[in-house]
Amino acid sequence: MSASRPLRLIVLCPHFAPDIAPTGVVMTRIVEELARRGHELHVITALPWYREHRVEPGYETKWWSVERTTWGTITRVNPFPGKSKSNIFRRAIGFVLFSVLVGIRGLRAGGNTRVDGVLAMSPPLTLGVTGWLVRVVRGGRLVFNIQDVFPDAAIETGAISNPAIVGLARWLEKFSYRRSDLVVLLSEDLAENVRAKLGRRDRHRVRVIPNFVDTHAITPSTRNNSYRSELGIGEEPVVMYAGNVGYSQSLDLMIAAAKAMPNVIFVINGDGSARPSLQERAQGLSNVRFVDYQPIERLNEVLAAADVHVVPLRKGLAKVSVPSKSYSVLAAGRALLAAIDPGTEIPRLISESGGGVAVAPDDPTLFIGALREMLADRDRLAAMGRGGREWVERHVSPSGVASAYESLFRRATVEDR
């Protein structure tokens, strides 16, 4: 078997273009980069649903659809979405049903012949079991990509607390890791978390490959753009959070800062289970704007509109999650303020790049103080933006990340000769 021949891969993921979920953006670009290298790929993912947490128009009545591409196929299945993220039991049932459909379609994707590998993404964690079953039937190496370490994040935020459910989730987590040939994490913090769970015998399965940022699609541009105009914002300084508005993010810091800094506009761009309660707390604050998700085509414009972007993560969560939006902010040449556990991936990134400031999580006083200092020095903000942009150009290109994944599967084909 030649090491240079094209690979045949099956990709199992929760989102894929045109869905705008960050994990979908990541996996779409990885697939595109692998396709450019001449590989055959068969993607099994969800029907588009992330924007409104319901299947988008044109797809509602379908259990699945299959699209043929120049590099393989994209099969989209019903994700069984629920409008409320707080209903854990409903979400769990949806994940299981979705994973079963993904598995059924994965067994036949691209025919029923042997493939070189299966690339599965979590969350949902159930896709690890699905990936293992598909690999048992179709062959090759299973590479399990972990975007957030579950159930740790759900336990830390109190989303799940029932001992029986926690025990089942822990068992499923270890089962998925140990059935994978390789488990890929986004940072050394996450990798150490998983290594500790696997124990000495299986620690060798863990690899670190960071998410990428598309430095061609996201570039520094003017802050005075149509997005600002639509929100009725002129020259005022803008502090923005763009992403999922969930309970893992300490977005109450934004509300506290808005009360303390009435001359600054605070924009929360996104949706999620925590948004209604945040909007209640922001009532009467004329300098807080809540904006729905924007089309992916406007990402560069949205990022450019802010002077400072905020990445707030509750205490204890930085070892189970790496907010990939941080890379996009730096690529846009904007300063980053991270309220996150010290000594973890994002504070290290900020220190290396000079692209912002990191403070301890869940501390309004520290957060507001750092924000005041940043906004008081426009030259310093500009220097942070330049430093962040230069860092991402050197370290997290899409081609480099795709090459790293290719090497994981390529090594298996050589070993199997």
Image (tube, helix red, strand yellow):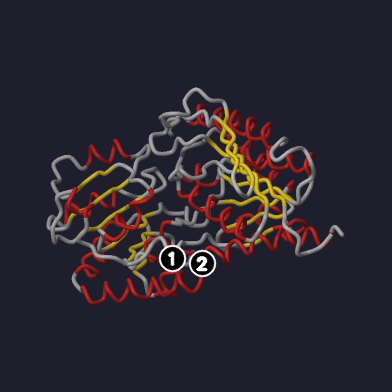
Q: Quadrant of residue 86?
A: top left
Amino acid beneath label 2 = Ser
Q: Residue at x 39, y 43 (%)?
A: 247
Q: Residue at x 54, y 29 (%)?
A: 78
Estimate the x, y position of residue 366 in percent, counting from the top left.
Answer: 29, 63
Residue 159 higher or lower than 87, as above or below: below
Q: Which of these two is toward me, 45 or 383? A: 45
Residue 85 higher or lower than 215, as above or below: above
Secondary element type, mark 2:
loop
Asked if the residue at tag 1 contacts the one at tag 2, i.e. Cβ–Cβ closer than 8 Å, the answer is: yes
Q: Residues within 10 Å of mark 1 (few under 14, many from 20)?
A: some
Estimate the x, y position of residue 114 in percent, counting from the top left.
Answer: 79, 45
Q: Is residue 50 left or right of residue 149?
A: left
Q: Residue at x 72, y 57 (%)?
A: 6
Q: Quadrant of residue 68?
A: top right
Estimate the x, y position of residue 398 in percent, counting from the top left.
Answer: 53, 63
Q: Which of these two is toward me, 2 or 127? A: 2
| Lower position in the chain sequence, tag 2 or tag 1 | 1
Amino acid beneath label 1 = Thr
Instruction: Tell me the residue that label 1 is attached to.
Output: 215
Instruction: Tell me the residue that label 2 is attached to.
Output: 397
Inter-mark Cα distance, 2 to 1: 7 Å
Q: Is residue 387 left or right of residue 413?
A: left
Q: Residues within 10 Å of mark 2 (few under 14, many from 20)?
A: some
Residue 386 higher or lower than 320, as above or below: below
